[in-house]
Image (spheres, rainbow, N blue to C red):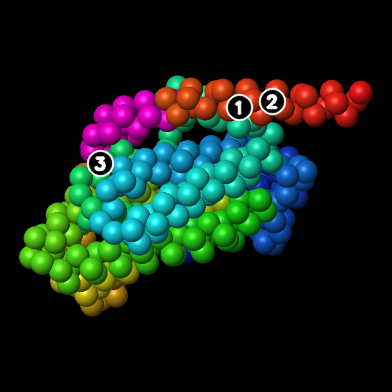
Amino acid sequence: MYAQLVETGAQRLRGVDEMSAQEQAFQQRIDAGVKIEPKDWMPEGYRKTLVRQISQHAHSEIVGQLPEGNWATRAPTLLRKAILLAKIQDEAGHGLYLYSAAETLGVSRDDLLAALHSGKAKYSSIFNYPTLSWADIGAIGWLVDGSAIINQIPLCRCSYGPYSRAMIRVCKEESFHARQGYDIMLALCRGSAEQKAMAQDALNRWWWPSLMMFGPSDAESVNSAQSAAWRIKLHSNDELRQKMVDQTVPQAEHLGLTVPDPELRWNEATGHYDFGAIDWAEFHAVLKGHGPCNRERLRTRVQAWEDGQWFRDALVAHAEKQTSRAAA
Ligand code: BYC
């Protein structure tokens, strides 16, 4: 599959004869499965691709706290509230590991955050949708964290050492998140008719945006071929999306819920589910800032950054005092 992905876009990639000797040696290390570490020589394109992907990933973790934060004060029981708070804290931790991984590539966290706050940097489209009911917290854990795991397990084996190592812990925590989401859905589906209807409504609203999380179709994915050649991407967007559908449909059946896709059916010949067309116009609109919550998400992040200024100033003042005391 990996070879196919590289081959698909091979005509768009530079041939070996166009690479410098240093680039060829680098590619050979990648092909041999050697991890690239921060002090190793790397092509500028490899560094930039990683900075782009890792920082978008970090921003997604941080912005991803917001839809769930909406329910921290309204979780139905103390236990659910404690679990939700722990999950939201985990997402903050993931963001921090990822910003640290990006910093090993010579960028500053302040610059990355400035790009997020100015609206220049992307974060996952999924976090621009609202959480209207408690069932949405279940659907996010089940579908969004479920998709995140499918996308991120292969990243544990990607070529860049600090990113691959950060992903190991992130994936362990994501699998707890997905289970807690499914547990919420299960409780609702075993509850009253109104609770089950809430769960169905959440699945209806989150299903298609979750499929969009994997990015554009392989034919439209501009970065895939090069990222596959550099082993930053080990599976294509469509492969991972298919895996999510195949894995999730039986789970929906177990819940007694209906996936909102009239074209969804098992294909005996391929051994996969066929599914309907994704509304790519909606995906692109969300990426351009026109999703239901883009403005609110960005405003909240900028406000949080400004509100935290006094604390960052205090940390710097404290560090300066310690340094001057040590010098004296
Ligand atoms: N949303 O050539 P493509 C989480 C952009 S965190 C927005 O296929 P690539 C979680 C893409 O960036 C979820 N933008 O790109 C957190 C590119 O634009 P640029 C985040 C998207 O990079 C808290 C353009 O479209 N996960 O799960 O090869 C709580 C063309 O796409 C999206 C990660 O970041 C999108 N959905 O592949 C719960 C994982 N999709 O940059 C859960 C790491 C595509 O050229 N990232 N774009 O201007 C990846 O694996 C890859 O970056 C992607 C995209 C598969 C997302």
> How many residues crowd around disc 2 within 10 Å: few (fewer than 14), some, or many (20 or more)?
few
| Farthest residue, direction bottom | 268
Q: Main secondary structure of the magenta part?
A: helix
- For the point 48% across and 25% down, which residue is it? 307
Question: Label 1, on which residue?
Answer: 312
Q: Earlier in the sequence, mark 3 or mark 2?
A: 3
Drawn side of residue 120 relative to residue 260, left or right: right
Other residues around mark 1 within 10 Å, as few (<14) / some (14–19) / many (≥20): few
The boundaries of the magenta stretch are 281-302
Q: Is residue 167 left or right of residue 31?
A: left
Q: Position of residue 149 (x, y in %)?
A: 44, 60
Q: Which residue is mark 3?
A: 130
Q: Amino acid at mark 1?
A: Arg
Which amino acid, mark 2?
Val
Q: Is residue 280 above or below residue 107?
A: below
Q: Disc 3 on helix, strand or loop?
A: loop
Residue that carries the numbered disc 2 in the rendered image? 316
Structural distance between the alpha carbons of marks 2 and 1: 6 Å
Residue at the image position 27 percent from the left and 48 percent from the top: 74
User: Is residue 189 or residue 149 the one in the foreground?
Assistant: 189
Q: Is residue 285 magenta?
A: yes
Say which residue appears at 23% left-offset and 38% top-offset: 282
Q: Nearer the viewer, residue 105 or 29?
A: 105
